[in-house]
Every structure is written in C-alpha cells, then in structure tokens.
Amino acid sequence: MNEYKKLNIKEWAVEDRPREKLLANGARSLSDAELIAILIGSGNLSETAVELSRRILSSVNNNLNDLGRMGIDFLKTFNGIGEAKAVSIVAALELGKRRKEAEVFVKRKITCSRDAADFFIPLVGDLNHEEFWVLLLDRGNKIIDHYKISQGGISGTIIDVRLILKNALEKMGVSIILCHNHPSGTMEASDADLKITRKIKQAADFMDIAVLDHIIVGQNRYISFADEGMLN
C-alpha cells in the first residue's frame, strides 16, 4: 500500500503559498490562518501549516482576541506546535496589541468614554486576570501618565487610594480615569466596583482631583460609569 505523502509548502501551487501570496498581493490578501501559517512555517505529518493554523483558530471560534488570551501551553497542545512556534504566535499577537496601544497613545487626549476605552482595551482587554489602572490627565484632558495599581480580583485586592493620589499630585495631574477589566467579559459593575469608585472619588475630591470616569473593559467591549450615571 502506498503511504500518503503530505506536500511540503514549497511543493504547493504558487498561488497557494502564503509567503508568495503576501509578496504578490500584500498582507491584506491573506486569511488569518495563512498569516499564522507563515509564522509557524510547517504543519505536521497529516496537516499543512495552513490546515493546522485553521484548526488552531477554530478552537477559539476564529477569534484572534480569544487566541491572544491563550498562552504557550495551550498552543503546544496542537500536534506540530512546539515551544518555538508557540512563542512566535504569542509574540506576533503581542505586537498587534502594542500597535493598538501606540495608535491610541499618539492621540494623547481623552474627549469621551470611547477614547478612554480605546486606550485601555489593548492594555487589559484580553487578560485572564483582573488589573486596576489609572489614567492621569492635565487640564486639557491630555494624557500625562498611566499606571497599574493592582492585579487580581477587585474584591480580593487592596486598592491603595493613597498611591493613586500620590502619583497624581507628584505629576501635577488634575483629573484621573479609573479602569479595570472583567476577564469573563461581563459588562456589569459589581458592588465592590461601585464601593471602591466612591472611595477613590471622595478622597480625590478632597485633593481637588476630579475622577472623570471608571471604565470596565473586556473583549473589545466596555461600560462607562460616567455614561451610566454611576459616579455620583
């Protein structure tokens, strides 16, 4: 019986080779699976690189954001994906995330809740754990700085209000926007969220620092305490 031989990528028709397709038609002409196939270079004994990439994407419902939440150990469960290939995929997804951050940060001015969400979603939107961040603004609502205050669940992590205000005072900030993520994707403020927001706002008011908003983000979605009337 003849053993089935899987074609090497160099033996494919030219129009089916991801690298050649990119060179001829540009990166936008490639599917997500084809782009990942370029990263991993080869598949396994029964799958081409593109077929393997399609299977990886299928495991996360073809959602790149969900794939970005997965780690190296998850990728290594696929036959044909070793540590080096998994690292390449994770690194590429991280570059995409940082590109989003850079595009938002160039603007450097917050005019609405959407601007704040666009700033924070690349930072924390695809994390598997909660983080609490602060965006520090000047009188023109231009960004002075942003910094992480804590990591872990809000109810189980101490939010140091003094640290938030200390940083704001040292850098001459006049207003702040709070943000944390919900890894579950649930866009609903908990009692703990409301309680810590009130606590920070009361302390900030005493220092003449305005709390403009508290943004909860998750998987490309967000809610704004200011928009929902929950800051009072």
Image (spheres, grey):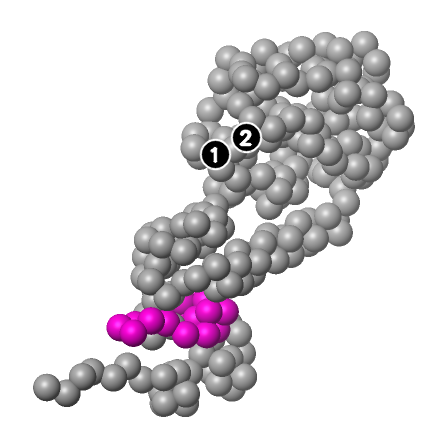
Q: Which residue is mark 2?
A: 130
**In the image: residue 219, left or right of residue 211:** left
Report the quarter where the C terminus lies: top right
x%, y% of residue 91? 57, 58
Of all residues, the one furthest to the left in this rendering is: 1
Q: Secondary structure at mark 2?
A: loop
x%, y% of residue 40? 46, 69
Earlier-in-chain disc, 1 versus 2: 2
**In the image: residue 5, left or right of residue 144:** left
Answer yes or no: do the residues labelled 1 and 2 have beta carbons within 8 Å? Answer: yes
Name the residue rendered at 25%, 84% in the picture.
Answer: 5
Report the quarter where the N terminus lies: bottom left
Quick check: 117 above or below 20? above
Name the residue rendered at 63%, 16% in the picture.
Answer: 158
Residue nearest the observer in this picture, 79 or 92: 79
Name the residue rendered at 77%, 45% in the picture.
Answer: 108
x%, y% of residue 142? 80, 39
x%, y% of residue 8? 36, 84
Measured in 3D between alpha carbons, the distance from the residue under mark 1 to the one under mark 2, in whole angstroms, is 7 Å
From this viewpoint, is residue 22 visible? yes
Kind of residue sitting beneath label 1: Pro
- The residue range painted magenta reads 31-47
Quick check: 14 above or below 165? below
Q: Which residue is mark 1?
A: 183
